[in-house]
Image (cartoon, rainbow, N blue to C red):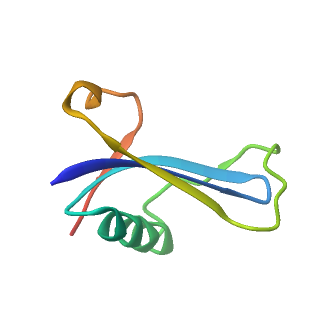
Amino acid sequence: MTAYRIRASMGGQQLDHVVEAADCTEAILNLSEQVDQGKVEIIEDGFTGNTRVHITYEELYESEKNRAVNRVKAA
């Protein structure tokens, strides 16, 4: 499993989480399920006023595993 840091923002809201999954598609889909279930906190930032969802991800290397972000494991 690989750790992916996923960031999403839209309309003054954002999330920033680390998800462990086999690939980036599985990671994004798993995080989406976690958001639907209310298990992921969405932060009101008042800054990102876009009308479209912006999603970015990065593959984290072993040296970055202790980053101060939340972790969600793939089911």
Rendered view: 54 above or below 25 = above
Q: Quadrant of the N terminus?
A: bottom left
- What residue is shown at x 43% (from left), y 47% (from top)? 17
25 vs 22, left or right, is right
- What residue is shown at x 82% (from left), y 67% (from top)? 51
Rendered view: 14 above or below 39 = above
Rendered view: 21 above or below 65 = below
Return the residue nearer the eye: 34 or 28. 28
53 vs 30, left or right, is right
The x and y percentages for residue 9 are: 66, 55
The x and y percentages for residue 67 are: 35, 28
Return the residue nearer the eye: 59 or 18. 59
The x and y percentages for residue 57 are: 46, 51
75 vs 36, left or right, is left
Q: Quadrant of the C terminus?
A: bottom left
Which quadrant of the structure image shows residue 13?
A: bottom right
- Residue furthest toward the left? 1
- What residue is shown at x 79% (from left), y 60% (from top)? 11
Which quadrant of the structure image shows residue 74?
A: bottom left
The x and y percentages for residue 19 are: 32, 53
Q: How many marks?
A: 0
Which quadrant of the structure image shows residue 21?
A: bottom left
